[in-house]
Image (cartoon, grey):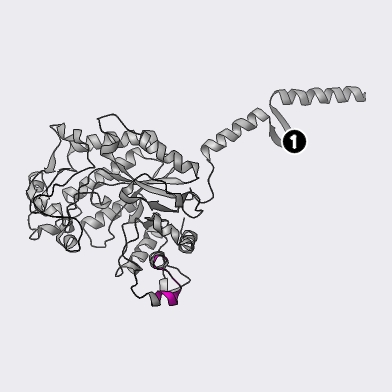
Amino acid sequence: MRKVIFLSGFILVLTLLLCGEATVNGKEELSKEDLSAKAAKSRATNPPRDGRAGLGKGIFVTARGNRMVVADELKNNPYATGVQAGVVWAQLELIKGKYAWERIESFLAELDKYGKKGAFKFVSAAGKVMSDSQLARGKGRAGPDVVRKNFGTPEWLWKDPNVKRLGGISTPKGKLPYYPVYWDPAYQKHLEEFIAAFARRFDGDRRIEYIRMGGWQIGTNEPSFYGGAGEFIVEQLAEHGMNTRGFKDKRKLLRGLSSKSLYARAVKDLIDIWYKHFRKTRLAATIHFSKQEGSFEEAMMKHCFSKKTAILNTGLNEKDKSDIRKEYREAHDKYGCKVGWGGITHIGQFSDEAELAKRGRTVKYEAILQGIGDDDNPDYAPASKVSYLVFGTNFLEDKEAVKWAFEHLCQ
């Protein structure tokens, strides 16, 4: 009898094992093959992280010229999440419909090897003309012999007779390149075809933390209508439908545009194109916080808030750091946006090193403290609710500051 029971039990267990399933303590036990398949599926949907990257926050570094370079200082730094690099339309689509994705793939593969992530700043138009105040500070050059370049827009675009363009004229600051007319349907069609192809290849790629949309005012890659090229192409803008009447100071063209202006509507349309195709990867933008009702800047801010866009400022000034911290906090808590610095520029630069020494801070540490803020320290409150920091590789030298910064970033 015992032999019969034993044999029956053995047959039952063998049958279950052959079917790939068994029950232990009321729980499903999978075969080795099923376990292997389940693990592979888990890796695909929940790829391994290094414990620092992929958390919806992070510290990213940049190389000069926004190049796709993985610096040695980054590779083994546990508090550095990855690299923010430039993605230039003209470099990725030299020939219409032919995409050089290998540039991005090799960059992401190297980052992934070290457990790091990539972030991108998209450039569709570039070739900035400096304003008078910038030139006075020693930036850039001016003069009839200076030829400006737009390295962001593909050359083949201008061969389409339906595409409208601005620029191509001589000015006291130099010969302007051609720039896109952002509300031109023909231009938007070409750009959307690129963005759609970009999304088909990389949307949802676990190696990418975010993509900063760009090519217009909020992207800081535009032909600087804030005081550079804008003053010289006002007539061309009017020819293409923009209402420029009433602007006595042409250098302040965009600061006077309304939320209903042709330019504002065009930028919203371009943002919507990105969201139409990128449904998984986080999108980011650079905006100027404004409470001026009906202004261009307020319109851009509200549009980005409505889409929970990550807001990356280009840098904070001494005069506005506390106000920006409050704006960041509201954007994070009220609208659900990730926020952060797209760069560390003008803050924390104390000339009195003795004062810094009393605080026990380096210049870099002070800059981070003033930007992020600290609710536990009244000298730096309120906190900004910052999720991302982007700065040069040299910041990694200050290990204590970088560690503090990462630990105080907000998911």
All told, the count of numbered labels is 1
The stretch drawn in magenta includes residue 330: no
Residue at x 80%, y 22% (from the top left corner): 11
Q: Quadrant of the N terminus?
A: top right
Q: Observer-nearest residue: 280 or 353? A: 353
Residue at x 60%, y 30% (from the top left corner): 37
Check the image and name the residue furthest to the right. Answer: 1
Residue at x 78%, y 24% (from the top left corner): 12
Q: Is 34 located above or below residue 176 in the figure?
A: above
Mark 1: amino acid:
Val
Residue 114 appears in the picture as rendered: yes
In the rendering, at what x and y percent does residue 341 appear?
A: 36, 58
- Give the labeled residue for mark 1: 24
Region of the chain picked out in magenta, as a range: 355-364
In the rendering, at what x and y percent does residue 79 appear?
A: 49, 55
Predominant SS of the magenta segment: helix
> In the rendered view, does 154 fall on the left or right side of 384?
left
In the rendering, at what x and y percent does residue 350 appear?
A: 34, 72
Residue at x 75%, y 36% (from the top left corner): 24
Circle 1 Cα neighbour tier, 10 Å, few/some/many (<14 / 14–19 / ≥20): few
Q: Observer-nearest residue: 85 or 23? A: 85
In the rendering, at what x and y percent does residue 357 appear?
A: 43, 75
Q: Observer-nearest residue: 300 or 129? A: 129
Residue 180 appears in the picture as rendered: no
Badge 1 marks a residue whose secondary structure is strand
Q: Is 142 located above or below residue 106 in the figure?
A: below
- Residue 131 sits in quarter: bottom left
> In the rendered view, does 7 fall on the left or right side of 241?
right
> In the rendered view, does 222 fall on the left or right side of 286?
left
The stretch drawn in magenta includes residue 356: yes
> In the rendered view, does 48 fall on the left or right side of 329?
right
